[in-house]
Each structure stands twice: as C-alpha cells, then as structure tokens.
C-alpha cells in the first residue's frame, strides 16, 4: 500500500515522533526504488508538489489541525520532516544521475558518455567566417557596423543622392514616425554593408584594408535566391596608388582560395553609385568546370553559361572620399577599391544548396549537416 497521510488525533510528542518516522520511512523506501529520470519527476511531485504533494497535505492535516498548545512542537517537527524529505528527494535525483556508477560507487569509464548536443556553426556564418579569413591572411582586419542605419551612411555618403533611382533597387524597412527629422538622419534597416566603409574611414586614417561581414535587409519577397534578410561581406582597401590591377589580383586570389585553385575569374562592367569604374566579378562554374553541362544535363547553378556571378566591386568613387576628406582621404592623394558579396550566396555555391530559404527555416535536419 502506498503511503497516505493519516489524520492525527493524538498530538503528544511520542505520537508526533511516530507519525514523522512512519512518513520518513515511506519516503526513503520510495526514494530508493526510483529507477530513472522520468519516474523521478513523479516521485518528486508526489512528495513535494505545492498543491497536493504529501508535504502540503501534512501541513494541512497535522499542523493546521493541531490544538493550540501542541502547535509549536508540531511546527518544529514538521520543519525537520520537511528538510529530511527534501534531502531524500535530492539524493534520489543524484542517484538517478549516477547510474553509470556500480554498487561500490565506482565509475565505469567504458560506458558511453552523455552526449550533449552542442550545436553547429550556421553554414552562412561559416562561409562568411571562412571568406573573411581568406582576407585576414592577406592582412585585412574585420570591421562591423550597425544594422539600423541612417539614410546618410546607407545612401547619401555612398553617392546615392536623395531621390536617385538607384535607391529604388535597395528599398527597405524604414523606421516609422521620423517625418520631422531631416532625411539624412532618418533610420532604416541597412540595405548593404557598404555604410561601414564610411564609418570606418571616419575612424581610421589610410592606409586601411578591412572586410565587413553583416546582416542586411531589402524589400525582396522570399524565393529560392532572395530573402528580405540576408548577409553580406564588404571589402575596402585604401592607400596611395591602389589600382584596378590590385583589385583584380586580390579578388582573383580570394576566389581561388575560397572555391578552389582551378576557378577562373572574369570582370564585367557594371554600375554602383559609390564606385567608378564598377564591375561584376564572375567565377568559372566549379560545378561543371565551365562547360555549362553536367553529363547530358544542363548545369543549373551557372544556368548553362559556365560562369557564376560572385560579387560587385570597383574603384572607390572620388565623390565618396569627399565625405571623409577631412579624415585624411583626399581624393587627389588616395585611391582604393571596394567589393561586396552575398554571404548566403557564396554559402549556397560552396555547399551546393539550391534554395536560399533552407538557411532560414531552422530545420535541425538541414543544419546538422554542418555539425
Ligand atoms: N553594396 C552593393 C550591393 O549591395 C555591393 C557592392 C558592390 C559593394 C560594389 C561594394 C562595391 O563595395 O564596390 O549590391
């Protein structure tokens, strides 16, 4: 018969002693029979649950029902009893956790350990970190900046004048209720990591070489290659006499380091407000080797062209240096190159993931492939 709390009629010290001893004996017996974690909870609840655990019942039946003159003595005994029961429950918890020990308390070191899932680095962050490391080995430092950015840093100082059509391609979330502020001070979620170029040049004199990983937002409906939130890696090198040749050599080396030494690069003219000239860098498709075909099938990642767009880049536009001229960036004296790439995109290419959305669903079965 499992223990139930009896009603007390006799409150003499001897009777209280007996009732408490009975109760402890029952608890101790049950404690030594707890086989595992699941049963431990039931055992704990039976004795200690606030609402109707045995301790609560004892409180109600024995203490509250005690005659006035016995209340003090009963109270002291109940406190002792409570402490002992808590101890028994705690001991049971430790014992259940110690099942790897034999009866003499020795640990069997041949038993498998307790596996704790420690998680894995997210593939996008991993790709981003590895790409940054390629540049760090060339002497670049890491810089970071805020995700909530002002119009000034996100657009104006990057040579997107107010109302310039290039802003439309980078529509984003604007913080509400800022109509009374001048436009350059209004806050938005940054659409690219490029504003950190300006922020860094405000703080550090040339020469500088930095890479900037970070989260960006755009008004892009989600599909297999777009997401309203994604990740970029920005780069900036400024010194005297930096040329387009330096840009080409640096990025060609970085692509070979990251994707493999067989990869070829191709630069094609493009436009960005903050670089002049601007280019898009294509890499030869390392999946089909540039042939556009995989056996008799068309190669999808390069859309059968043999080339994959990897990033945007260019020589820093002198108009951009004008905004940081007083910090040592006189456009007549310094020159530099910049680039920006999608971290999610390079992760898709490197790990062969064909749907960007998979990165953001948080499905453990997908993510644990990088564990
Ligand atoms: N900020 C551009 C974008 O989000 C990418 C980019 C292109 C960054 C050229 C650069 C650059 O620094 O030089 O599309």
Image: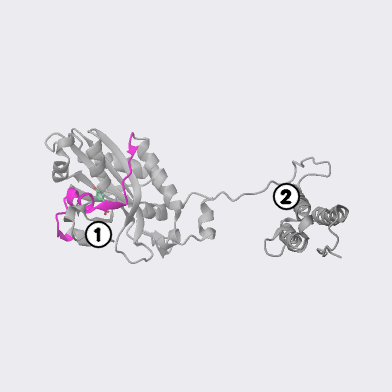
| Quarter location, residue 200 | top left
Q: How many marks?
A: 2
Residue 333 shown in magenta = no
Image: 309 above or below 201: below
Residue 11 versus residue 121 in the image, above or below:
below
Viewer-side residue, 6 vs 193: 6
Can the viewer see residue 79 in this picture? yes
Q: From the Cβ of disc 1, is ligand 1 less than 8 Å away?
A: yes
Residue at image location 39% in from the left, 40% down from the top = 133
Residue 42 versus residue 271: which sits nearer the camera?
42
Q: Nearer the viewer, residue 297 or 276?
A: 276
Residue 266 lies, in percent from the top left, at 27, 49
Q: Is residue 165 above or below residue 108?
A: below
Task: Give percent across and percent down for residue 111.
Answer: 74, 45
Residue linked to disc 1: 170
Please name the residue shown 67% across and 48% down the image: 114
Image location of residue 40, percent across then percent down: 73, 57
What quarter of the picture does the N terminus occupy? bottom right
Cα–Cα gap, marks 2 and 1: 59 Å
Structural crowding at the residue carrying mark 1, measured as other residues with C-alpha within 10 Å and reported as few (<14), some (14–19) or many (≥20): some
Q: Earlier in the sequence, mark 2 or mark 1?
A: 2
Q: Is residue 150 magenta?
A: yes
Please state the horizontal and vertical placement of residue 259, each as a whole percent of the image: 40, 47
> Which numbered circle lies on residue 282?
none
Side of 265 relative to 127 (left or right): left
Q: Residue at x 20, y 50 (%)?
A: 152
Q: Which mark is residue 90?
A: 2
**Magenta span:** 139-165
């Amino acid at each position: 018969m499992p223990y139930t709390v009896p009603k007390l009629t006799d409150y003499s010290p001897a009777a209280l002693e007996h009732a408490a001893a009975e109760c402890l004996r029952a608890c101790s017996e049950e404690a030594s029979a707890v086989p595992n974690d699941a049963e431990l909870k039931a055992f704990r609840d039976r004795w200690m649950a606030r609402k109707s655990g045995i301790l609560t019942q004892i409180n109600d039946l024995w203490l509250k029902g005690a005659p006035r003159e016995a209340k003090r003595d009963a109270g002291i005994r109940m406190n002792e009893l409570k402490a002992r029961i808590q101890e028994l429950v705690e001991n049971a918890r430790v014992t259940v956790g110690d099942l790897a020990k034999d009866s003499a308390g020795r640990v069997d070191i041949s038993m498998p350990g307790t596996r704790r899932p420690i998680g894995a680095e997210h593939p996008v962050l991993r790709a981003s970190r590895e790409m940054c490391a390629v540049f760090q080995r060339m002497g670049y430092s890491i810089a970071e900046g805020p995700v909530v950015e002002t119009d000034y840093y996100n657009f104006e100082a990057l040579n997107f004048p107010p109302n310039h059509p290039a802003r439309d391609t980078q529509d984003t979330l604007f913080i509400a209720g800022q109509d009374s502020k001048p436009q350059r001070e209004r806050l938005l979620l940054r659409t690219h990591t490029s504003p950190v170029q300006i922020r860094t040049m405000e703080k550090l004199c040339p020469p500088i070489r930095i890479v900037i990983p970070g989260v960006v937002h755009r008004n892009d409906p989600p599909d297999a290659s777009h997401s309203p939130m994604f990740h970029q890696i920005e780069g900036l090198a400024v010194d005297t006499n930096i040329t387009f040749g330096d840009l080409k050599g640096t990025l060609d080396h970085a692509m070979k380091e990251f994707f493999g030494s067989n990869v070829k690069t191709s630069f094609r003219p493009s436009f960005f407000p903050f670089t002049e000239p601007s280019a898009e860098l294509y890499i030869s498709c390392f999946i089909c080797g540039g042939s556009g075909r995989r056996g008799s099938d068309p190669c999808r990642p390069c859309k059968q062209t043999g080339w994959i767009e990897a990033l945007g880049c260019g020589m820093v536009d002198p108009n951009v240096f004008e905004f940081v001229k007083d910090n040592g960036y006189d456009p007549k004296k310094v020159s530099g190159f910049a680039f920006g790439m999608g971290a999610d995109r390079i992760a898709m290419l490197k790990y062969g993931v064909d749907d960007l959305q998979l990165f953001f669903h948080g499905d453990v079965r997908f993510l644990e492939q990088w564990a």
